[in-house]
Image (cartoon, rainbow, N blue to C red):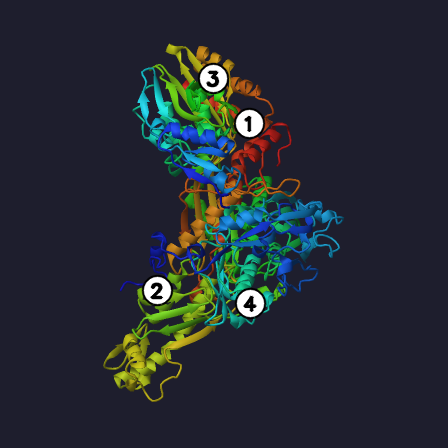
Amino acid sequence: MKAAAFDYVRPPDLGAALRHLAEGGGDAKPLAGGQSLGPMLNLRLARPKLLVDVSRLRELRGIADGGDHWRIGAAVTHAELEDAAGKLEGAELLPQVASGIAYRSVRNRGTIGGSLAHADPAGDWPLALAALDATVLVAGAKGERKLPADQFMKAAFTTALAESEAIVALLVPKLSRARRLGYYKFCRKTGEFPEASACAIFDPERRIARVFLGAAQGAPIPLPAVARAVAEGGRAAATREAALAAVGAVPNLEESERRMRAAVLLRALQQAYPA
Amino acid sequence: MTAQGIGARVPRKEDARHLHGRGNFVSDMILPGQQEVAFLRSPVAHGRIRRIGKPEGLEHAVFTWADLPGVKPIVAQSTLPGYRLSAQHPLAHQKVRFVGDPIAMVVAASRAEAEDIAEQIELEIEDLPPLVDAQKARADASVRLHEEWPDNLFIGMSYESDFEARSRGAPVVVRQEVSLSRQAMVPMEGKAILAHWDERVDQLIVYSSTQTPHMIRVGLAETLGLEDARIRVISPDVGGAFGYKCILQPEEICLSWLAQKFRRPFRYVEDRREHLVAGANSRQHRYRLTAYADEKGRLLALDAEIVIDGGAYSMWPYTVGLETGQATGNLPGPYDFRGYRCKTACVATNKPGFLPYRGVARTGVCFAMELTMDAIARKVGREPWEVRHDNLVPVEAMPYDNVAKKHYDSGDYRKALLQVREKIGLEAWRERQRRGEPDGRLIGVGFASYCEQSAHGTSVFAAWGLSLVPGYDQATVRITPGGGLEVRVGVHSHGQGMETTLAQVANEVLGIDVADIKVVLGDTGLTPYSTGTYASRSMVMAGGAVARACEALVPRLLTIGAHLMQCAANTARYERGRIVGPQSEVSIKDVAEAWYRLPYRLPPDVDLGGLEATMAYRPKVDTGAFSYASHAAAVAVDTELGHVEILDYVIVEDCGTLVNPMVVDGQMLGGAAQGIGTALYEESPYDANGQPLASTFADYLLPGATEVPALRIFHIETPSPYTAFGMKGMGEGGAIAPPAAIFNAVNDALRGLGVEVTETPLTPRRLLDALARAKSGAGKT
């Protein structure tokens, strides 16, 4: 299928882009890497009248050291994050997650902000950024606002973004050297969206213990009880029973789904606390 | 010049253009004034068309069946008893019978604009209850797909040979039920057609991505009411076909009609969504087998019930009887037993009409038979390979007529099995299995053996009662003025490398450098008639014809050559491109120079056929040259995630004389990748309303480079006694055994848990569900 007719603009700066979005109302849509929007256009599932190309906006580009956090431009590609391995001290999970997204050809174009805004339940960034307790910097006609990443995604393909807003950057707090990271996803084949995913972040120095389950029906699901238990008990607390119990809190799962998700959660926890 | 004939590892002549992106596919073609065509397809599975409202002001751009007077529907004839005719209108007439059934075609300057118009067509369809499940459609005739039928049965077949006597009192009885899910074939290039009317030659020219250009011409002549000579079908570069493109396509008729009517070029290129929806047309079989064996697992008799979900229409020209007959006749496989009873039903449902996908019914029958073989082994407590070995037709019995009257020409089936067991290293895997994996995964090893009827000819197709049956394949060869060679054949090559391998055959006879041999395929205007490329036939049939045609030139070369050397013809001899006399020798180049440029040098009694010959060929015995193989898979099963990893995969195959070992390996590899797809990934599921649930690659998973392990392929070479050079067809074999080998390996891994999986594809969900059921006490899926 071919996309229905649309107009395309590539504004020179963020202000102009936001004006286009405001003027277009619900009929204007930001375009970054187009890795999800492109197919949706071709299938005529998305039918915007105007595409506002934000992929080259200076304000949305680049990775900057913000002292206690990293500022990642919304239009930074997965490939750029993948290639930043070894350079993002305290945010080592970002390159790790980026390197596992789809295929390199998708990573070359797809962006972190675009992925978050698209809000696919099985997406990597909604899960990882929620677990990392990142902050989403959003701009609209009325100026900028900040939202916690774990509050950003509301449901499948639904976010807290207003129609005329765009994500500008992600602010990812730096973890200490004592950090313990676990990220596990199960894909039927390389490059597919996962059947199940989980992310576990522990930082004893900063008193951080955050565990989230991804690839759920909607937004990533926080699992604070198992996070607390493993933060206190370490590897010994990362058991199959604990994982099954944690996943049991997720509604509407059939036995086989529960089993798969529990296994994925357990593997993420065990990555954080290896034997 | 190094050896380039039969058996040489000649790099493929076609690779350079494809690797550089310089091929010429229909999508690459642009003719002046070309219009693009989009189809409006049925959004419902089963319904009666009440109204098709063309958008106001755009009526001229929209065509329905009512606009195509004189065009005949596709009706695939067969004289098989009980076979029911289905009329497939290229654009729906009165009823729609599957989601994706073409209803209207729209013409515009671009595909996007054509789709814009298609969206505006108003459809009023009265919903009818959909037939989604073949067993239910078979049992209940209250809703009928084709109303003039008494029920929903396309065809039923039954076969029986000494079943009662052989099965009676058998000490071991094993019951097995297996099923395969519906699939699409997913060639890299989908359907694509560009049709125009060439005023100069007063001919309809149809570029179609097809395997069978001559047969399509026959079909178009029939449905459009044009004399064949007014139609030229050209199959340009084709990006894979797999059976999807060996039948007359409704879109070919529609585009040809447009070109004939409006005398300008029209193009249609199928997109992925159309393919996955309207092309979900293969593999869906269900088997219920009962095997009767002795205490050692030696098979005595087999009882089978097969149900094929035939979809809405019977394809032209093969009919759904092809799949039904292949399933019934090929189920006994490579095994030696004498009691057989099989009932096969092909049922009409609201899905795309069943097409013959690479391997045809054999992927299904191999899956059913090989899972049964393992079940017998479990029951008698022996290694599956041992039971398989004892049941395989022994080499001493060749040629062998099996219980279903298939005539196996040659081969050492047991040797392939023993070799694959050795190559996979069964004992080492058994040891590793006993040791257990550090990560808790379970190890399993599985085997699968099959034999594959290839290059079957007239008698086989005639027995299916078809209206168009393959016979002699022809080849034209023509020595050029420069001493090179043109080879023209009516088959087509769409990944098989025949531009190279047919040149190798010609080289074997004439010794002309492969680089100087031009093979022309796939064009009714340039090549002699052939039914085309399907059923693993082209290397044997077209290859045989090329050899015969080249051989026909030899006496002529000898006569002219002797005259050039001024010696008596009976004192000269021919040695692969050289004409050697008592004192001197001349080459084909010298002969060509005399014939074309310096004809005063020719003898007065020169053969007036010149340096060009057309010869026909069919094998001495036309019931097929049977290739065969044994596959072995070693897998690790993650019972927590339901994931299967293939750790090693070995193929030992015998396709007779290898024309080009690299091409054979490539065919095996591609076929096996598709077999892995059937085993683990590919599925076109439908909901209760007959809506397809996998319409994009997000839902229809294919194996990619990371899912196909480095296959290890080994060859045995047993020449067929019936074919030129002993060649056998082998284009399909790779796709036959992988589901069976992989499932047997998984079941081997899960044996300790009392779990058996029996339904393709083995998704994590199916595997985990089976494990959950086993836990609750009901093991089998």
In space, the residues marked 1 and 2 are separated at their CA atoms by: 60 Å
Image depth: mark 2 or mark 3 in front: 3
Determine whether B699 is above or below B498 in the image.
above
Dot 3: chain letter: A
Which amino acid type is marked by label 1? Gln
Disc 1 marks which residue? A217
- Residue drawn at (40%, 52%) of the image: B665
In space, the residues marked 3 and 4 are separated at their CA atoms by: 69 Å
Respond whether the residues carrying marks 3 and 1 are from the same subunit: yes
Dot 3 or dot 1: first in sequence order is 1
The secondary structure type at the circle numbered 1 is: loop
How many numbered markers are drawn?
Answer: 4
Residue B754 placement, left or right of B411: right
Dot 2 or dot 4: first in sequence order is 2
Q: Position of residue B66 (x, y in %)?
A: 65, 59
| Residue situated in front as seen by the camera: B633 or B149 | B149
Disc 2 marks which residue? B5
